[in-house]
Structure formats: structure tokens, C-alpha cells
Image: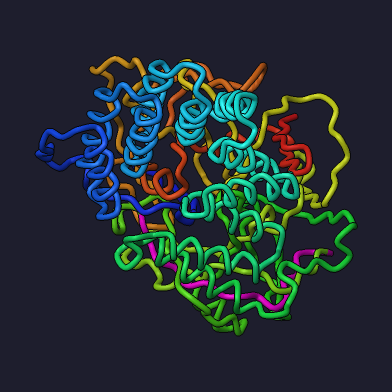
Amino acid sequence: MHKRVWWFTLAAVPCVALLLSAQQAPKPAVPPMTPAAGIDFGDEMMVKGRYREAIIAYQRARLASPDPSQKVRAGAGEVKGILRMGGFASAVDEAAGLLESVPGNPQATGVLGDALWAAGHFVEAEISYDKALSLDANDARALHGRGRSLAARRQLPEALKLVTAAVTRDPGEESYLYTLADVLEQMRRYPEAAAALDRYQAAMPDRKTNNAARWAHAQADLLRRFGTSVPFDIEGADQTFRVPFRIENDKVLVKASINGRPAIDVVVDTGAEHSSLTPDVARASKVDALTVIPTAGIGERETGFRDLQMGRIDRLDVGSLHVKNVACFIKAPALSNLPITETQGFAPLALGLSVTIDYANKVLTLSKQLPAESGGLRLPLRVQRLAMVNGNVNTKLAAFIVDTGGDLGLVVSGRVAAGVNADPALRRIPINVYGTAGRDKNAFVLPFVDIVFGRGVSMSQASVAVLNLDAPSWLLGIDIGGIVGHTFLSKYKVTFDLQRGELVLQ
């Protein structure tokens, strides 16, 4: 049968380093030892990236120790190791078991919050963090979790206060330093963000072999390259900008000028962290590569990973919107031997502006503060590098990336598909899907799936694409359960309201 070629633009950057092959390795031998020795052994194995051995040692220590503080210490290490291997559901189960063994313990409650957040269960995670803080207002893990949650809803000053407090209480915890750098970057405080990334690298005992350290070094270098320039400097930033667009090949296209060059078509892409240029357009527009950043997306290249150059657009003009000093991906080295052509991408959310895509009238609206919409469905929106909402797949809660640059309407991950109660005799129809890392060779269509986002916004007994979303999940540190793409979104007037933390579908 004829297979249509589908294209996804999903791209993300890492927050932790992961041993991707560890889940397939034989179970390692870990000698018996006391709980205290087991914790020390687990710490040593974590430093070496030997997560399976660390998890076994931590778990044994947690189950054997009568000391609540040892249980929590071991349980926290166990959950951290599981998450570094991408075991999102297992992490929730183990964290819940830890809390059952020490009920009412604020640290264990915070550990559960971390596991729930990584699983994409954002509301439940926030409840856990609030509970932990009600038990101990100074608990570093809960302060960090609540701060990260506020940052994901763009409440940045409040987020910075909480994350800074967490770092003050535990200055050696890598994840707190990463979030501190992320919040400072979102606030456009680049020198401070770069300094926080330096501290993040320094806190990694395995930084010489850790890909997250490599990313942090490159990211800090990029931020410093901005010097005294104001990043994402929008002319008339308090204005509302309206830009006409057209639809072509299931893409939202606007005209954009790069560094004063003649306007070209760019894809409006909410599924990428930054705007992007192909190498030829970057050369013609005099956008030079400043560093190389590890990214992740759909495709098989290095199991979904791809290093991309990053540069800075001196001036980006999209209709009446004029922005200076725009960080961007340069898609180099280019993908080769593929039946698709990479395009230029415009990532409006990266500007820190709320966005409305009016598909009926073909108008893109961007503003720091959009007027409140009346009617329609409002979904809580979290932005942790990428914009996400929750939905239910056959009643299973999952985090979905909202990607206007993706062709397909609805996608679920292989992990979510494996948990769907589907007839094993159902035929799996292979499809050709390409992303930023090439082709997903195992992509297929799964029929008879129910996906619900809220009242009136759902698909019943639908056929959905199943893709490998492991790489972006592992690198974001959140289990990405699916993607909402153009074909689904184009039925609505879609608003990404960053100020109110909502995705509105009308």
C-alpha cells in the first residue's frame, strides 16, 4: 500500500545524562551489604553511571533499614537512578512504596512529587510538593519541585525565589542547579544562567563522560556569546502583533526575513525549543554557528539524538514583529538520503509571547498579554523547554507535546501504546515518519484508541500513530506520552496563553 511521508519537528535539549542501553543489560551482581554500606555503594555506582547496580543497592538498603532517614536516603537514590534510565512508571511505584514505609515524611513526599512530575502527572506532583512543604517549609526537594512547577507556568520571579532557596539548602544537587539555570535563562539573565550552568557541570562527578555536562558547557558558551546584547529583544514589546499565514502541506507558514534578507517561508513550530534554519539559509543570511548542542527528537539517528549547531539571528522580522538577537538551531550537519526536505522553523513560544493561531481566519496573534478568551476548553499548560498538556489515552494519563509543526494529528509513544488494552490480533500498519533525527523505522498505526483532553475535545476509536518518543522523554526528564499535531489542532482556534498557563481550544 502507499505510505505517506510524515514529518515532525520535535526537538529538545537534555537535563540529565542517561544510560540508554542499561535497561537491556543483564541484571548485575551486587553483593549483600548493610544498609549504610548499600547507600554508599549506590552513591559510587551513580557517579560511574552504573545505574542498575545503584538501584539494586539502594532498594535493598531501603527495604532492610529500620531507620526512616536511611530509608528516605536510599529511596531517593533509587528513584533518581530509575529516572536516569527512563523508568518513569517504575519510579512512581517505588516512590509510592517509600512513602508507604515512612508515612507523613516530607522528604519521601517530595520524592514522590519528583517521580510524578517525571511521569507527566503534573497536578499530582504539585499536590505532593505542597503536602511536603506543609510538613516542612524548608524541604529543599519540595522547594525545588514547586519552583520548577511555577517556572513551567511562566511565574518566573516566584520560581526563582523557591529554586534559589533549594540550591541554598542543597548546593550540590545537580537538578536544582539545572532548574536555576533554566529559570535565569527564561528571565533573559544570561550571564547568571551561564554561571549556574558552570556550577551544574562542577556538581557532576562524572562530568568528563556525562553528555549533560557536554550540553551544559555548550549552552553556557552560547549564552556568553550574547555578551551585552539583549536576547530576544522585541521592538514594541508591549504591542500585539498579528501576522497572516497560509496552510500548505499541513504546515502553518508565515513570511520571515532573516537579517534583512528577502522574506522566505518559515513553519510556525511550537514543538521546538528554538527557531531553526537550514545550513544554506544560515549561510546566505550570515548566521554563523556559535556552538554545537545535543538535541533529541523523532528518528533513528543515534537512537533519536542529533547534534545541531546553534547560532544567533541578529534581526528576525515576521510581519509587524521585529526581534533582535534570536537564538536559533542551524540544522547542520544536514540529514541525507531522506525523501523529505528540512525547512525553516519559527518558534514563537521561544520569544516568551503568548500565541493564538486562528486557523479559520488564518491569522497568527502574538502578545505578552492576550485578552482572556471566552468559551472553549482550557487545559493547564506547562512549558518545560516544550509546551505540554495532559490527556487520557484509554483512561491512561499522559503528557502531550503541542506541536503545530507536526503533520500527524495525534501520536502516542510506544510505551503508552504498550499499556493500551488493544487486541493483539489487530494489524499494525507501518507508516513512514521522519523527524529531526531521521526516520522512525518502527512507526505504525494503532486503531481503536480513545484520547480525551477535556469535555468536547477528544477522539473516539481513532487510529493514531505510534512513535518512539524515548529520546525526547529521557532528555526532557518527562515521560512524553504523545504529540498533538496540526491535523488535530487545525479544527480549533488555538491559544497558548503563557501568562495564564493555559492552552485554550475554541
Q: Quadrant of residue 150?
A: top right
The number of callouts visible is 0
Counting from the top left corner in percent of width and height, residue 154 is at 71, 45
Majority secondary structure of the magenta segment?
Answer: strand
Q: Quadrant of residue 272?
A: bottom right
- 392 in the magenta segment: no
Would residue 262 be visible to someone looking at this image? yes
Tell me if residue 80 comes above or below residue 237 in the rendering: above
Q: Quadrant of the N terminus?
A: top left
Would residue 357 be visible to someone looking at this image? no
Counting from the top left corner in percent of width and height, residue 442 is at 28, 41
Q: Quadrant of the C terminus?
A: top right
Tell me if residue 244 comes above or below residue 378 in the rendering: below
Residue nearest the viewer, comparing 202 with 409: 202
Highlighted range, magenta: 305-320
Residue nearest the viewer, comparing 429 with 16: 16
Please give left or right for residue 424 compared with residue 473 in the image.
left
Counting from the top left corner in percent of width and height, residue 337 is at 31, 65
Residue sitting at 69 percent across and 50 percent down? 160
Counting from the top left corner in percent of width and height, residue 144 is at 58, 42
Residue sitting at 57 percent across and 44 percent down? 403
Residue sitting at 74 percent across and 36 percent down? 493
Residue nearest the viewer, comparing 59 with 478: 59
Residue sitting at 76 percent across and 53 percent down? 353
The scheme the figure's colours follow is rainbow
- 319 in the magenta segment: yes
Tell me if residue 88 comes above or below residue 18 in the rendering: above
